[in-house]
Image: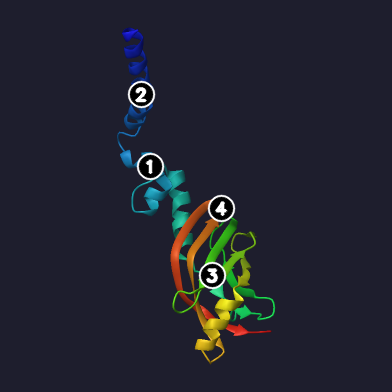
Amino acid sequence: MDKVKVALTLLSIAIVVGPLGFMVYEYRDNLLGIFIPPEFQSLLGGSGSNSQQSSSTSNIAKSLSNFQMPQAIGSPAYNTTTGAFNYPFNFTNPFDFPVALNQFSAEVVGPNNETLGNVAIQPINIGAGQNGVINVAGNLSQSAVNQLESEFQSGNLHVSLKNVTVNVAGITVNIPSLSNIGSLTNTG
């Protein structure tokens, strides 16, 4: 029985260590390549593994240098009757391939971090070099808005976003907060 136990233990160790050892051997000249693909290493200042990858990586790096954050179109709108919130953004795709914006969600907060509601977008595909309008929409809590409106007699309420989640082409990015994205104006 002890021989079986020892044999199974050695087999378990070989099953785990074998593939790891093979990967370390294969990537012996570039151990970072186990975790970071060559395309990203090139963007970070490393070198690609061949000229085709270097060329495509160079195109991506050039596109990234032309990247601009989505630009707000007008001001956010808030309808006091329905609680609907809408804020359109224009985005220009700097890449030579289409971009799929699969998800955007965030909490809308007031000046003192009071939660007002949540916002999201509908998925959108923007062609290479094309412009697209991204409509960020959602519903805000009427009670929180009423409380903040009573504090701010000007009729405008400055808002920020927190717990922002963005998914572009299957890559998800979480941003803790985006401060002072604008002010809400009553359209209702």
Q: In this view, does 97 lie above or below 68?
A: above
Q: Position of residue 27 (x, y in %)?
A: 34, 34
Earlier along the polypeptide chain: callout 2 or callout 1?
Answer: 2
Residues 44 and 109: in front is 109
Q: Which residue is drawn at 57% across and 79% down?
A: 145
Q: How crowded is mark 2: few (under 14 residues within 10 Å), some or many (20 or more)?
A: few
Q: Name the residue under label 4.
A: 169
User: Badges 1 and 4: C-beta atoms under 8 Å apart?
Assistant: no
Residue 146's image quarter? bottom right
Q: Name the residue under label 1.
A: 35
Earlier along the polypeptide chain: callout 3 or callout 1?
Answer: 1
Q: How far apart are marks 3 and 1 (CA)?
A: 30 Å
* Left or right, residue 134 beside residue 152: right
Earlier along the polypeptide chain: callout 4 or callout 3?
Answer: 3
Earlier along the polypeptide chain: callout 2 or callout 3?
Answer: 2
Q: Mark 2 points at which residue?
A: 18
Residues 47 and 81: in front is 81
Earlier along the polypeptide chain: callout 1 or callout 4?
Answer: 1
Q: Where is residue 11 in the image (x, y as percent from the top left)?
A: 37, 17
Q: Distance between the residues labelled 4 and 3?
A: 16 Å
User: Badges 3 and 1: C-beta atoms under 8 Å apart?
Assistant: no
* Left or right, residue 140 beside residue 40: right
Q: Callout 2, which amino acid?
A: Gly
Q: How far apart are marks 1 and 4 (CA)?
A: 20 Å
Q: Which residue is drawn at 34% across and 18% down?
A: 9
Residue 124's image quarter? bottom right
Q: In this view, does 11 lie above or below 98?
A: above
Q: Is residue 22 above or below residue 92?
A: above
* Left or right, residue 49 beside residue 127: left
Nearest-to-viewer mark from 2 and 3: 2
Q: Looking at the rendered structure, which numbered label has been put on residue 70?
A: 3
